[in-house]
Image (tube, grey):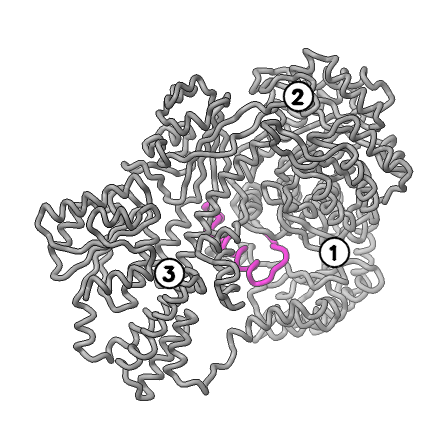
């Protein structure tokens, strides 16, 4: 461990280049197990290791990327330990003590729970087995690399750290968009992995140096640990049947200085790079000073897809409190039955309302709290983006939850009781969680803030022994209810103020306690929140669905300079004001109806029609002079592509709504005329794709036609028998597939054979005008054209 | 062996979704409110999609003109598939479903007067399912590259050209798609409707 750290202090550590592509270049056949092939051809892998070391690599990776139980079993190899041990020994004998050997651990190829079928503890077991083999071979450090699943990376890191204290690198693989294939961004990965104990974090493979440089830039300001970069030799290209990376060694090395300048501390190469790449890279950066990690601690929480920063300079962080069964009978019932739909619903509503973190509590008498909280964590990790706060008084629950949670979580909470400190602090340290400190001890909650200070200082002293910093803790101001203790609010304010200004930690308050037992509680909560924000409050446990609270928070952030350019405040209230904006009363109602159809404004149109009728406008004129011209113009704009499908449909829906409203006032003959032609619509037998047919139906209804929709997968027999029951009819048939299009012919032939004289219109993705004509039918490309065709046929 | 993916994380390819809905860059006029609303619908659609998938690598036994014989006693008669797989050692089957929830949402919204939402949902899910196939190929690409192999540039789905739709049955069975809640109609259509399967080849990378 010290060896690597010592080099890192002085200079950038040079890592090796590609192993897999190099083995292929040197004769490893396609499709074989690389680990087995190397054991059978030791001179090849040893030459690669040696050449990288001679090129200047400080660290070479053992050829054990796929030497885990799952991958090896695909080649019917069972002795995982021996394979790993022997491959490390080959590396050692190749490079001796001239380079360090990193035991290379790659992915299993399976996604780990909650994201996949491989159990989390099973994954840890698999990686431990491999790590033991690597240790037996004598590795100097570990590298967990090319991970795309955060939970798999965590499993591997926990496995290694539970059996060894050696320096461990964790390197994820990101697509060009800066996310892994499973959606994790590089910042969230960094926060999660460095808090879980990774000694260096970074990225390898998937992209060339240009894209990877961006990832380093994004991570560096938040990195407590050295950053690692191992890009590919550019992008693979197929040139004259040969797969080649598009970058030369010189071009690749040309990025070296940029990587060091932006903050990479360990640099090497991945697919396509060769010893010459590493040699040139080393030459380029050998005299450059390293950009060491710029921070020792960070107040941030992460999920697999999001990071939240907490602090005085940040906007107030809202912890949504709704996922807690206390006093919620329906949630209690669902949790007892093991159902998660309400949990999911509560999470989504809180996220939509502006929560930054979700508090999860599964404390319910008579249930297996560990099992339930893990299910909640699993569900939320998959479906939601927000980091979690683990809310429990049970150390076992906290431990299991932190172990399973695929991010950096917050523990809610830890009091000054010695027994709890002893149990919970080591757990929090192991999993790198942040902690809410509750300033109470076995004697209860001190009334005065001076006594609370003592507990806070004591808990922090104990936490510091395990490596915690003030960035890792949040102090709870404990808001007691003012109905029983009028001085309670002031004591909490003093606690928050002291923590913020003197002790310099983050703070939190559970807002709803303060008003317990009082009427109109929301006003008390809102006023209290504003006061707390002035005292420096950084987090609030609250109900984000309370608009007054969230608006006070937004206004407070703005007034305290935490909302740069007022962008959050303005964005929020511009949406509200758009929705509430005044209606242009000065424009005549018929024109407003025309405009509402043009803009697809179905929300306002019914009201406008009502107003128009009340104001004495004649219904028939409204239809003929405003509504139909509007929908016709929409059709024209759609034809010219100035409108696209959502606009066409929105206008059609607005037209429909208006028509429903105006219908009772239309002259009878108008109503009667519109009903004369009946249109039968069906998607033919065998085909279940009916969105196009549904759009046609909607458009026809808009133009006053009576539509009978027979649905999808409808037999010829059913269609023809339905036609027989109508007086005047046109039939529209749709099909998406070439295999089902032929069933249109069957319908038309059956109709002819049964002597039914009727007109057909055909449409669908694969149907052409020529095909329709061949069946003596009309063709319509889309909903707008269908209206024209039907109008023509019904004349 | 079939590899199952219980959670495929694909970000809806917005440009393709807009294009599928008929948006023509520089021609279609869209005001900011309409755009916000459509983007909001796309975001909502993403939440309804439960993308899962399955994939399997199958050895090619023999290709004789249009007759393609694969391991596990799978035989296809398709000249175009045979041409695609020429020079490949393996065939790669893949399947993706967006689940039944989104299909129900499309149907419900169409019949409950929110057809705009329904057509956007339809476009989002269609493009996302396609992106799901690309995701699976991307996932396997890393493994293939380390084995000195690569996918063919094109992939085929049953029902196109001379690769008959009825082969959907063989593909579904081999991928055990019923584990993902996918079944076939009598006419070999996949249910839920927003599901797809495809076949491509795996060949050794030529190095000079």
What residue is rendered at 37% in x and 23% in y? B66
User: Residue A154: percent from the left, percent from the top?
Assistant: 66, 37
Relative height, residue A67 to residue B16 (above, below):
above
Q: Residues within 10 Å of mark 1 (few under 14, many from 20)?
A: many
Q: Which residue is mark 2?
A: A24
Relative height, residue A377 to residue A48 (above, below):
below
Secondary structure of the residue carrying numbered label 3: helix
The one nearer the camera, A209 or A329, is: A209
Q: Which residue is mark 3?
A: B115
Q: Are marks 1 and 3 on the same chain?
A: no
User: Residue A791: percent from the left, percent from the top?
Assistant: 24, 65
The one nearer the camera, A140 or A330, is: A140
Q: Are marks 2 and 3 on the same chain?
A: no
Q: In terms of secondary structure, what is the magenta stretch mainly? A: helix
Q: Earlier in the sequence, mark 2 or mark 1?
A: 2
Query: Magenta residues, as a range?
Result: A333-360
Parent chain of label 2: A
């Amino acid at each position: 461990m010290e060896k690597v750290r010592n080099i890192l202090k002085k200079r950038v550590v040079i890592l090796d280049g590609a192993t897999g592509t190099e083995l292929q270049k040197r004769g490893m056949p396609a499709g074989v197990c690389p680990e087995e092939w190397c054991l059978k051809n030791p001179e090849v892998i040893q030459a690669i290791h040696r050449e990288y070391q001679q090129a200047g690599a400080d660290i070479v990776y053992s050829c054990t990327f796929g030497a885990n139980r799952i991958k090896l079993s695909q080649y019917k190899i069972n002795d995982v330990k021996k394979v790993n041990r022997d491959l490390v020994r080959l590396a050692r004998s190749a490079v001796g003590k001239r380079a360090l050997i990193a035991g290379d651990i790659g992915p299993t190829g399976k996604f780990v729970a909650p994201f996949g079928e491989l159990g989390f503890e099973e994954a840890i077991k698999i990686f431990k087995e491999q790590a033991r083999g690597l240790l037996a071979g004598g590795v100097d450090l570990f590298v967990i690399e090319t991970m795309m699943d955060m939970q798999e990376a965590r499993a591997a890191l926990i496995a290694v750290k539970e059996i060894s204290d050696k320096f461990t690198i964790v390197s994820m693989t990101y697509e060009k968009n800066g996310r892994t294939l499973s959606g994790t961004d590089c910042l969230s990965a960094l926060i999660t992995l460095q808090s879980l104990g990774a000694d260096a974090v970074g990225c390898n493979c998937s992209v060339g140096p240009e894209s990877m440089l961006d990832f380093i830039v994004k991570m560096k300001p938040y990195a407590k640990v050295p950053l690692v970069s191992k890009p590919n030799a550019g992008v693979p290209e197929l040139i004259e049947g040969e797969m080649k990376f598009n970058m030369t060694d010189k071009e690749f090395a040309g990025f070296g200085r940029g990587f060091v300048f932006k903050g990479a501390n360990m640099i090497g190469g991945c697919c396509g790079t060769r010893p010459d790449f590493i040699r040139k890279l080393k030459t380029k950066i050998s005299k450059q000073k390293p950009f060491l990690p710029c921070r020792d601690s960070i107040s941030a929480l992460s999920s697999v897809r999001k990071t939240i920063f907490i602090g005085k300079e940040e906007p107030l962080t809202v912890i949504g409190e709704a996922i807690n069964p206390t006093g919620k009978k329906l949630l209690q019932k669902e949790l007892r039955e093991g159902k998660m739909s309400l949990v999911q619903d509560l999470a989504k509503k809180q996220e939509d309302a502006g929560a930054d973190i979700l508090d999860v509590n599964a404390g319910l008498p008579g249930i297996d709290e560990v099992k339930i909280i893990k299910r909640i964590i699993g569900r939320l990790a998959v479906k939601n983006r927000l980091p979690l706060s683990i809310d429990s008084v049970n150390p076992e629950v906290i431990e299991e939850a932190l172990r399973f949670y695929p991010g950096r979580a917050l523990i809610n909470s830890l009091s000054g009781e010695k027994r709890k400190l002893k149990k919970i602090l080591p757990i929090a340290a192991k999993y790198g969680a942040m902690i809410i400190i509750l300033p109470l001890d076995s004697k209860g909650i001190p009334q005065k803030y001076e006594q609370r200070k003592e507990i806070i200082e004591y808990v922090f002293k104990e936490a510091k022994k395990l490596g915690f910093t003030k960035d890792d803790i949040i102090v709870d101001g404990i808001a007691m209810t003012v109905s029983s203790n009028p001085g309670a609010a002031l004591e909490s304010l003093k606690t928050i103020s002291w923590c913020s200004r003197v002790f310099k930690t983050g703070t939190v308050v559970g807002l709803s306690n303060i008003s317990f037992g009082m009427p109109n509680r929301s006003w008390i909560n809102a006023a209290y929140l504003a006061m707390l924000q002035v005292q420096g409050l950084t987090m609030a446990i609250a109900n984000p669905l309370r608009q007054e609270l969230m608006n006070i928070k937004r206004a407070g952030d703005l007034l305290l300079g935490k909302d740069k350019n007022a962008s959050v405040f303005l964005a929020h209230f511009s949406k509200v004001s758009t929705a509430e904006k005044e209606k242009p009363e000065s424009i005549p109602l018929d024109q407003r109806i025309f405009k509402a159809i043009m803009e697809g404004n179905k929300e306002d149109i019914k009201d406008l029609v009502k107003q128009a009728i009340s104001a004495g406008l004649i219904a028939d004129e409204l239809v003929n002079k405003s509504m139909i011209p509007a929908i016709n113009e929409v059709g024209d704009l759609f034809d010219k592509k100035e409108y696209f499908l959502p606009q066409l449909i929105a206008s059609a829906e607005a037209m429909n709504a208006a028509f429903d409203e105006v219908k009772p006032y239309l002259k009878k003959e108008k109503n009667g005329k519109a009903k004369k032609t009946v249109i039968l619509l069906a998607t033919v037998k065998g085909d279940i794709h009916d969105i196009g047919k549904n759009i046609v139906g909607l458009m026809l209804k808009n133009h006053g036609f009576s539509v009978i929709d027979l649905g999808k997968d409808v037999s010829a027999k059913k269609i023809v028998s339905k036609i027989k029951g109508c007086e005047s009819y046109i039939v529209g048939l749709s099909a998406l597939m070439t295999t089902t299009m032929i069933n249109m012919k069957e319908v038309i032939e059956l109709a002819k054979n049964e002597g039914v004289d009727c007109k057909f219109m055909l449409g669908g993705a694969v149907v052409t005008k020529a095909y329709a004509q061949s069946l003596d039918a009309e063709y319509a490309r889309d909903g707008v054209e269908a209206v024209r065709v039907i109008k023509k046929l019904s004349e | 062996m079939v590899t199952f993916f219980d959670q495929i994380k694909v970000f809806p390819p917005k440009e393709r979704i807009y294009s599928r809905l008929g948006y023509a860059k520089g021609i279609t006029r869209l005001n900011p409110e309409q755009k916000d609303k459509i983007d909001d619908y796309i975001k909502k659609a993403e939440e309804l999609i439960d993308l899962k998938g399955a994939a399997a690598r199958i050895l090619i036994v023999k290709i004789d003109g249009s007759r393609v014989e694969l391991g596990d006693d799978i035989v296809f008669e398709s000249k175009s598939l045979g041409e695609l797989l020429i020079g490949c050692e393996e065939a790669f089957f893949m399947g993706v479903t967006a689940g039944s929830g989104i299909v129900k949402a499309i149907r419900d919204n169409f019949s409950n007067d929110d057809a705009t939402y329904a057509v956007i949902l339809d476009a989002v899910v269609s493009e996302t399912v396609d992106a799901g196939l690309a995701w699976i190929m991307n996932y396997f690409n890393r493994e293939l590259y380390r084995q000195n192999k690569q996918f063919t540039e094109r992939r085929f789905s049953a029902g196109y050209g001379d690769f008959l739709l009825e082969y959907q049955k063989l593909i579904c069975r081999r991928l055990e798609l019923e584990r993902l809640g996918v079944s076939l109609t009598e006419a070999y259509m996949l249910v839920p409707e927003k599901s797809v399967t495809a076949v491509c080849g795996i060949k050794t990378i030529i190095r000079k």
